[in-house]
């Protein structure tokens, strides 16, 4: 056993329990008895949930910024008008995940409209731009321009905020900063779905800073340790093995890679919730006894559902048609001139650059709060991508 390692995927609670066991066995004489062969890997599904929680803490949780006309909370009122109360209390992972995606879609459509019209007045709408059949090289060039103009960078934001008030547009600064953070999250999601572990690894560092700034210090600490071990401490072959085992593809389909802890949580959902039994059968002993048969139960259900052509009997639902809603949000963004710089425009709340704040905190080794507990619990809808 001393010549082999066992990879364990989990959340922070799993890491704390593993550390407790190791600490209690430090006096043992052999690496096997000291559990040195066990390597903890942070679950990427919980990592993605932590990213969503950090965005929620930055853009929705502060009460002072909810009344800004271009705030994420105001956009949520357009996307989910009946769920604004849930968004400020316990929204859950899936709800915030969807809001982030839909908000950045509407924002990017507005950016494309502005950029297309600036290059050709006849392209006053995206429909006219599409009809003109632009060349791919032009589309790529325009995308680079959009990122440069409408996605904040730490250096560019610092320079803008160093200007006098008459030379600033605080709402534009907030909007470009939110564009950056939402695009960072979109990149994490797409990288995980495509199995691009290199992009996933590249995303760790900026999100570590964001975790630090938003009070998620344990996540920041554990992700930092994992990144340092992966790139510097572990042998190269071991690091490569770990990279190749952070994601899996249970279905074998394209764009269907999943984190290992996602698979574990999904199995827990079937074991502890869907097929746990009811009444006197819903005991821990009964759940453990039947847990090896969970996949058999599920296959039986699928066979019956397919045989009788039953619909809507799965946790995977059809995606809602958000075309009209996103068009409505895009019109609101256009009317509020969210991406048009207007010097002297003020904002009720100035969003902090959490990457910059996190860098400063890590350099100073300061802790600003101890809000470690994530607000999100998992349910069936969280296992749909």
Image (spheres, rainbow, N blue to C red):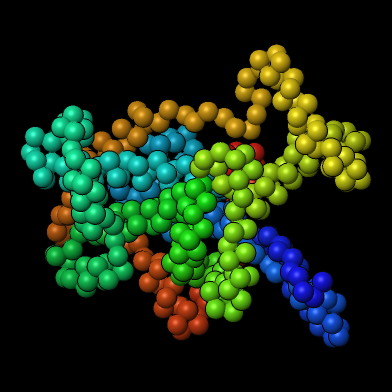
**Residue found at the very far left of the displayed protein:** 121
Q: Residue at (40%, 41%) from the top-left corner?
A: 102
- Above-or-below relation of 165 to 130: below
Residue 49 in the image: state x and y as whole percent: 56, 54
Residue 209 in the image: state x and y as whole percent: 46, 70
Q: Is residue 121 left or right of residue 104?
A: left
Q: Residue at (24%, 67%) from the top-left corner?
A: 156
| Quadrant for the N terminus in the image | bottom right
Say which quarter of the image contains residue 24: bottom right
Is 15 or 175 nearer to us in this picture? 15
Q: Is residue 231 left or right of residue 81?
A: right
Q: Residue at (51%, 42%) from the top-left corner?
A: 255
* Residue 377 in sight here: no
- Above-or-below relation of 129 to 37: above
- Above-or-below relation of 216 to 379: below
Q: Residue at (32%, 37%) from the top-left corner?
A: 329
| Quadrant for the C terminus in the image | top right
């Amino acid at each position: 056993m001393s010549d082999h390692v066992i990879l364990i995927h989990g959340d922070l609670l799993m890491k704390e329990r593993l550390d407790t066991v190791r600490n209690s066995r430090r006096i043992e004489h052999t690496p096997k008895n000291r559990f040195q062969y066990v390597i903890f890997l942070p679950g990427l599904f919980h990592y993605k949930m932590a990213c969503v929680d950090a965005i929620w803490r930055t853009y929705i949780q502060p009460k002072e910024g909810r009344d800004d006309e271009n705030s994420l909370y105001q956009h949520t009122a357009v996307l989910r008008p009946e769920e604004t109360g849930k968004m400020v209390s316990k929204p859950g992972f899936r709800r915030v995940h969807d809001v982030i995606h839909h908000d950045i879609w509407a924002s990017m459509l507005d950016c494309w409209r502005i950029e297309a019209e600036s290059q050709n007045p006849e392209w006053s709408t995206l429909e006219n731009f599409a009809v003109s059949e632009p060349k791919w090289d032009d589309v790529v060039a325009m995308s680079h321009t959009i990122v440069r103009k409408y996605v904040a960078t730490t250096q560019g934001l610092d320079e803008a905020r160093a200007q006098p008030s008459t030379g600033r547009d605080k709402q534009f600064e907030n909007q470009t900063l939110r564009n950056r953070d939402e695009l960072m999250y979109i990149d994490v999601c797409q990288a995980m779905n495509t199995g691009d572990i290199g992009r996933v690894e590249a995303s760790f560092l900026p999100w570590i800073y964001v975790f630090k700034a938003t009070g998620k210090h344990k996540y920041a600490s554990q992700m930092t340790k994992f990144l340092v071990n992966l790139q510097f401490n572990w042998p190269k072959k071991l690091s490569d093995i770990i990279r190749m085992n952070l994601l899996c593809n249970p279905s074998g389909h394209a764009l269907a890679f999943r984190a290992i802890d996602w698979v574990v949580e999904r199995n827990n959902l079937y074991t502890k919730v869907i097929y746990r039994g009811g009444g006197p059968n819903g005991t821990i002993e009964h759940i453990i006894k039947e847990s090896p048969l969970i996949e058999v139960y599920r296959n039986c259900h699928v066979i019956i559902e397919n045989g009788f052509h039953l619909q809507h009997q799965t946790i995977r639902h059809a995606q809602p048609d958000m075309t009209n809603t996103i068009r409505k949000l895009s019109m609101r963004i256009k009317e509020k001139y969210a991406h048009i710089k207007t010097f002297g425009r003020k904002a009720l709340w100035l969003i902090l650059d959490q990457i910059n704040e996190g860098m400063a905190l890590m350099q100073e080794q300061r802790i600003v709060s101890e809000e470690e507990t994530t607000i999100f619990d998992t349910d069936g809808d969280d296992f749909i991508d």
